Amino acid sequence: MTISFEERLVEALLFASAEPVALSEIADRLSDLVDAREVLASLAAHYQDRGVQLVERDGRYAFRTAQDLGPALRQGRVQARKVTRAQIEALAIIAYHEPTTRAEIEEIRGVALGKGTLDALLEAGWIRPRGRRQVPGRPVLWATTPAFLDHFGLTSRDDLPGIEDLKAAGLLERRAGVTLAMRVEEVDEADESDA
Amino acid sequence: MTISFEERLVEALLFASAEPVALSEIADRLSDLVDAREVLASLAAHYQDRGVQLVERDGRYAFRTAQDLGPALRQGRVQARKVTRAQIEALAIIAYHEPTTRAEIEEIRGVALGKGTLDALLEAGWIRPRGRRQVPGRPVLWATTPAFLDHFGLTSRDDLPGIEDLKAAGLLERRAGVTLAMRVEEVDEADESDA
Amino acid sequence: MAAAHAFQEDPVPVPVEDRLLLQLDAFEGPIDVLLALAREQKVDLTKIRILPLVDQYLAFIQRARHLRLELAADYLVMAAWLAFLKSRLLLPDPQPDDEPSATELAEHLAFQLQRLEAMQRAGVQLLAGTRLDHDVFARGVVEDLETPVGPVLYEATLYDLLKAYGSLRSRTAAPPPLTIAATRLYAVEDALERLRQRFGNCPDWTDLEQFLPHGIADAMVSRSAVASHFAACLELARDGLIDLRQARHFAAIQIRSRQGGGESA
């Protein structure tokens, strides 16, 4: 079975488009000699029994996964959630300073941690409690998990670039301050091993 | 032509995801009686001449539009990320020598990396730290990511242009560059002897 | 405009070094320049001849300095190293055994040029290959399959993590002590000292430029020397030690010593 250039183009166009595409827009991409409706009809017929279907909504066209596959696709399908700034900062502090306490995280960030911050990191499976510090109050110590390494593509915590590496990669924001045109000796900031 | 339930399911699964899906994840959705590789091979054959193709990226699978349709699809789309010369050279050096350190990249290019070069590659998701070299200073080693292969249309690192020839010619061996001797102290000396 | 034809000159071949000087900004350091020069030999880089290459590079640097183009220090260090390499290649090798021979150094340089060339070509090929969002496109929508039943997946990249820690540390780290780097600019005091030593035997009008120190590699330092010598002149003139004159705007500034006031004009 051969497929025409127009059919291939419309197939790719609908596949790559973030929104359903209007008929007029499809027609604009095609030569005047070709009827966009015919191309769409032919594509729709091709996909009829497949796992993906060509659907029309208000004169706009899109591919959608076949409805009967919904339950099978949803199985084990995860719900994506964006990580907040407080969460990513707390996670970074735990990763660089582990094992560490909530109080230490708050001290480094300079603000108190919101209620759900560590909970979210726990739910994500990135941190776990690892014993308690032997000081009054015996606060819980937090550490990262193998799932944390896995998610961030790290083979070990040792992969985390040090302060100097971050600086060299341009990831340490420059503080407002005195910079001269001439070479200034970089001041050695902080050793990371303070826990 | 009939299509199996498994083929429809995998087709829908790959369609529903923008990122390449791991073989193991695909196999998890299928009955133990079905070989995921066979399903993928059959799908790939079906899509061979179509506007959308099944591609493999380092053991992960995804649908991508056919290469020859690029110019027609590009119209009115946001341009792909701009890459500077320093960035692409650093990226090539990492890809062909990985894992490798910042100092080695600088030796090969004979010039210091500007701040922000590795940063940009990291932000694009093309490189990641992978361990440290066990030498004094324990410098971070950099390697490429699956997203790098996906972005540059490579099935695996073996697919890098000319990598076999370069290996055979010994050009990928680790050897320090002559510029190694150029350090700031010596530059200052040169200035003084000139004055 | 028939005359135009009559005076049309044969195209003068522009030397390679001059052509490269025009694109100096586009180079990524001295090795990159060397590679561009090596490509001019139009031979397989594995058969590159190092000596002519060294000469070309030195000529390139010479031209750049003659034209007072700003060259980063690396370029001059490279020139010094190549001059050293050249002398060792030409002279019998007197080096002790534990140091690499001149031939080895030359071979190594050739290796480095080949390697950089290979990486530059690889970069070009990567960019010219099939690129996502340019030649091929991914699925435009991630389908929301409604009522997800699986676990929650938190989304964050390694870049997010490192960036968060980086900005956190720069936000909260104790401010570094103020350091003012020693300046390498030419001080007015030094210029005064220099001029005091020299103008004594100079009863005739002489261009100030003659008194400037020569061979300062760094363009910034070189410019500061001009400024500080001019300031020093003004001071000496105020003290009645020299006369100053300038024929017109932007003309050369001339000075002469005023000995015992007898010669004052």
Image (cartoon, coloured by chain):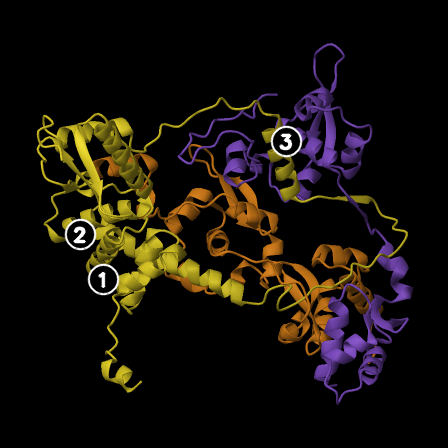
Chain colours: A purple, B orange, C yellow
Is residue C173 placed above or below C35 in the rendered structure? Answer: above
Q: Does label 2 or label 1 sit earlier along the sequence? A: 1
* Residue C26 appears in view: yes
Q: In which quadrant is the C terminus of chain B drawn?
A: top left
Crowding at label 1, few (<14), some or many (≥20) Cα neighbours within 10 Å?
A: some
- In the rendered structure, the residue with mark 2 lies on which chain? C
Give the SS element for disc 2.
helix
- Report how far apart the C-alphas of labels 2 and 1 lie in the structure: 12 Å
Under mark 2, the amino acid is Lys
The residue wearing badge 1 is C49
Marks 2 & 1 on one chain? yes
**Coordinates of residue C165 in the picture (x, y in percent):** 63, 34
Which mark is nearer the camera, 3 or 1? 3
Q: Measure the C-alpha gap from mark 3 to mark 1.
A: 53 Å
- Residue B13: % across, % down: 79, 61
Q: Is residue B174 visible?
A: no
Badge 3 or badge 2: first in the primary sequence: 2
Residue A173 appears left or right of C6:
right
- Which label was assigned to residue C86? 2
